[in-house]
Image: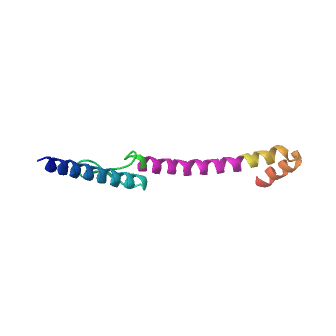
Amino acid sequence: MQDGMIFVVLLVGISTMGWLANNWIRARHGYPVENEWKGTTAKGDPDAERRIELLSSENERLTGQISRLEERISVLERIATDPAERTAREIDALR
């Protein structure tokens, strides 16, 4: 009777250690981790990909806006530093 209980305890312990080792390796390498009922749990927030996509598109939009503003600032700097006669000639040429 004693040997049977030891066998059951060892069997449960070995299977638990195997499950823990499996999940540790999966988590370490970025794979989804299994829960107790054979489902998988994604590492991190499930909405993270959507947020990353939104932030990336906003980043692209803001980068374009910054480049347009830099162009406008360079034109304003050129107008501010050029001699008045040259600026007046360019404005008259545009009319």
Does the magenta-highlighted stretch encompass residue 56?
Answer: yes
Residue, x 84% and y 51% (percent of image)?
89
Type of colouring: rainbow
* Camera-side residue of 29 and 51: 29
Boundaries of the magenta span: 49-72
1 to the left or right of 24: left
Rendered location of residue 19, percent (x, y): 29, 52
Is residue 44 shown left or right of residue 15?
right
Name the residue rendered at 25%, 53% in the picture. 15
Q: Is residue 17 left or right of residue 59?
A: left
- Determine the main secondary structure of the stretch shown in magenta: helix
Residue 26 occupies quadrant: bottom left
* Visible residue check, residue 37: no
Residue at the extreme front of the image, as rendered: 2
| Magenta stretch holds residue 58 | yes
Left or right: 2, with 44 as reference point = left
Whole-percent x, y for residue 46 in the image: 37, 47
Nearest the eye: 57 or 76: 57
Where residue 51 appears, as percent x and y from the top left, is 44, 46
Q: Closer to the camera, 2 or 51?
A: 2
Q: Is residue 18 visible?
A: yes
Where residue 12 sits: x, y (%)?
Answer: 22, 49
For the residue pair 76 and 45, the one nearer the viewer reads as: 45
- Report the label total: 0
Q: Residue at x 75, y 49 (%)?
A: 75
Location of residue 31 by image quarter: bottom left
Residue that sits furthest to the left in the current view: 1
